[in-house]
Amino acid sequence: MSVNKEVKRITTETLRQMKHDNQKISMLTAYDYTMAGMVDKGGIDAILVGDSASNVMAGHETTLPITLDQMIYHAQSVVRAVQKALVVVDLPFGTYQSDPQKALDSAVRIMKESGAHAVKLEGGEELVKSIRRIINAGIPVMGHLGLTPQSIYKFGTYKVRAKEQEEAEKLLADAKLLEETGCFAIVLEKIPAKLAAEVTRSVSIPTIGIGAGATVDGQVLVLHDMLGMTYEFKPRFLRQYLSLHDQIVEAVSQYVEDVKAQEFPNEKEQY
Ligand code: KIV
């Protein structure tokens, strides 16, 4: 898709300014060209090429199996469609945790091969050196605290995180550290709304919540969840704006019926 020079692109600086001006930031995931184009046209501020692609696109139980090559493929498809939104790409599990050089190499591959604008990674204090290395190379980094799905086997459950004081204090300290290290924003996933509000007040960079209440600087949802495509996934924090699962199944069964009954194609639908 050719770039429309009239459209003013959203940058990490735009998001910083939005927090400053008390304007809420909207973010959704996308993984492919067609959906990303619609999300961008809908006026979204930022698109996350999330490693949730592992679940919703590939059908894995967790986000762990998705590879760097697969994330780059999804990111390339999204970037081709997007005119305005900031495109952030998840560094997948195993591509940044071992050492800062590996983290930088993975982030560079994403930026160079997809044309995305920033990367996201999960974790706090333990990742400071890697985050610094990536940012020093000129790559913007979004942090992710609270429920970090790449650590699901450590947590053992997808329940709300940081309800206890010790974990809440660590999360707050991590958020401040991510800000000091130079992250441009932080995703806060599935934590008590009160804690998310405290983090949001305590850092000058935007916080983007998912299951973190209303007192954050922005919201993110998985696109397939908010469109009602992921049938059985209905956590309390999710608002479904459509029921696409049911509508698609209905449309397909109508098509099957029409083909079998020789009602499709009709005379106007042929040459
Ligand atoms: O991968 C993803 O979709 C995410 C969001 C849940 C924030 O990280």
Image: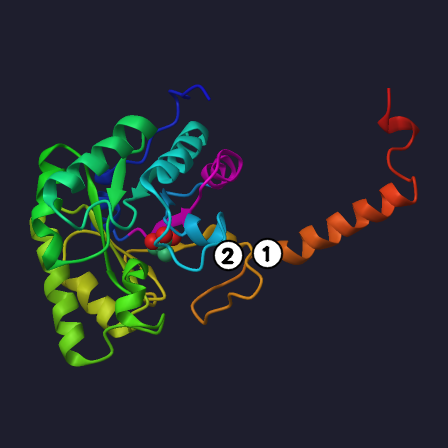
User: What residue is rendered at 16% in x and 80% in y?
Assistant: 165
User: What residue is rendered at 74% in x and 48% in y?
Assistant: 252
Depicted 111 relative to depicted 161: above or below: above
**Mark 1 — residue?**
242
Q: Position of residue 109 (x, y in %)?
A: 25, 31
User: What residue is rendered at 36% in x and 40% in y?
Assistant: 71
User: What residue is rendered at 39% in x and 27% in y?
Assistant: 7
* 52 relative position to 124: left or right: right
Give the secondary structure at mark 2: helix
- The numbered mark, 1 or 2, whose residue comes first in the sequence reads 2
Q: Position of residue 258 (x, y in %)?
A: 86, 44
The part of the image, by quadrant, that contains residue 232 is bottom right
The disc placed on residue 226 is 2
* 235 relative position to 101: left or right: right
Amino acid at pointer 2: Met
* 263 relative position to 250: left or right: right
What is the basis of the colouring in this image? rainbow
| Any part of residue 85 in sight | no
**Disc 1 packing (10 Å; few <14; some 14–19; many ≥20):** some
* 123 relative position to 39: left or right: left
Give the secondary structure at mark 1: loop
Mark 1 close to ligand 1, CB under 8 Å: no
Q: Give the distance between the C-alpha atoms of the residues marked 1 and 2, in whole angstroms.
A: 7 Å
**Disc 2 packing (10 Å; few <14; some 14–19; many ≥20):** some
Amino acid at pointer 1: Leu
The magenta-colored residue range is: 23-42
Q: Are marks 1 and 2 in contact (CB under 8 Å)?
A: yes
The part of the image, by quadrant, that contains residue 144 is bottom left
Magenta stretch containing residue 184, yes or no?
A: no
Q: Nearer the viewer, residue 151 or 218?
A: 151
Q: Position of residue 34 (x, y in %)?
A: 53, 35
